Amino acid sequence: MNNESEIEDFQKSVLEEKTEKLKIGKDKKRIILKLFFVIIIVIVLGFFLSYFQTEYGIFYSSEKRKQISQNLTSEAENWINKADFPQTEKIAQRAVRHDKNNLEAYIILARSLYAQEKLEQSRDTYLAGLAQAPQDFRMNFYLGNVYRDLGELDTAEDYYNIALSIEPDNIECWINYALFYKFDRQDLEGVLKVYEQALKVNPDNERLQKLYDGIKEELETEITND
């Protein structure tokens, strides 16, 4: 009996030992899995923090973000001069995200979008920039071009007029406005009126005078032929 009892006790102890080892093994697996998930979470969080730091500078001071935005704007300008518009778009977007008041970044971004024929996005970018500086000449002038290409001629004309009210001595803008009347409005009389307005503000400009005389002659020829 004693031997049987000892055998049973021995078997029980062996079973308990195996059970304990299995339990320890399971606990170790749980701990390893938990550690694995913690490591994954840390890596993912690190990735997102790194991304937001790079793209938005969330942990930088306002001055630091402005400086980064300026550096990115210079980089974007280099890319747009190389006609790499997708890369320009990418860099300029980062510049805007770092500093919402960086007007040059808005302009470069909008120009890159325009060059890629993303007209609606270009328009929206100029409008966002104008919200910061409604009296910026370039924003209004370029926005006029975008609306012209979108076929919204009345709105385009509104922005050309705003641009000219800001810089009435800008000869290229007057000429662009006249070409808008000639090719988009198809209105030679309108072209003549634009040049008349331009000459009132810039009476001694020979280039404007020659263009005015040429349109006047073209209009007179058209009337004669009719």
Image (cartoon, rainbow, N blue to C red):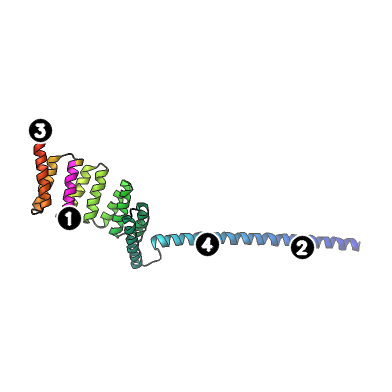
Residue at the spot of label 3: 225
Asked if disc 1 and disc 4 are in contact, CB closer than 8 Å, the reply is no
Q: Amino acid at mark 4?
A: Val
Q: Could you give the CA–CA distance between mark 2 and mark 4, rounded to whole angstroms?
A: 37 Å
Where is residue 58 drawn, in percent x and y?
40, 63
The 10 Å Cα crowd at callout 2, few under 14, some 14 to 19, many 20 or more, is few
Q: Quadrant of the C terminus?
A: top left
Which mark lies nearer to you, 2 or 1?
1
Of 81 and 52, which appears nearest the observer? 81
Q: Could you give the CA–CA distance between mark 4 and mark 3, rounded to whole angstroms?
A: 80 Å
Which mark lies nearer to you, 2 or 3?
3
Q: Which residues fall within the magenta stretch?
A: 171-182
Where is residue 55 drawn, in percent x and y?
40, 59
Residue at the spot of label 1: 166
Q: On the image, which quarter does residue 204 sit in?
A: bottom left
Q: Amino acid at mark 2?
A: Glu
Q: Residue at x 34, y 52 (%)?
A: 85
Outermost top residue: 226
Q: Is residue 45 left or right of residue 143?
A: right
Residue at the spot of label 4: 42
Q: Secondary structure at mark 2?
A: helix
Which mark lies nearer to you, 2 or 4?
4
| Among numbered discs 3 and 1, the one appearing first in the sequence | 1
Q: Amino acid at mark 1?
A: Ile
* 218 vs 38: above or below: above
| Among numbered discs 2 and 4, the one appearing first in the sequence | 2
Asked if residue 184 lies in the magenta stretch, the reply is no
| Among numbered discs 2 and 1, the one appearing first in the sequence | 2
Q: Secondary structure at mark 3?
A: helix
Q: Secondary structure at mark 4?
A: helix
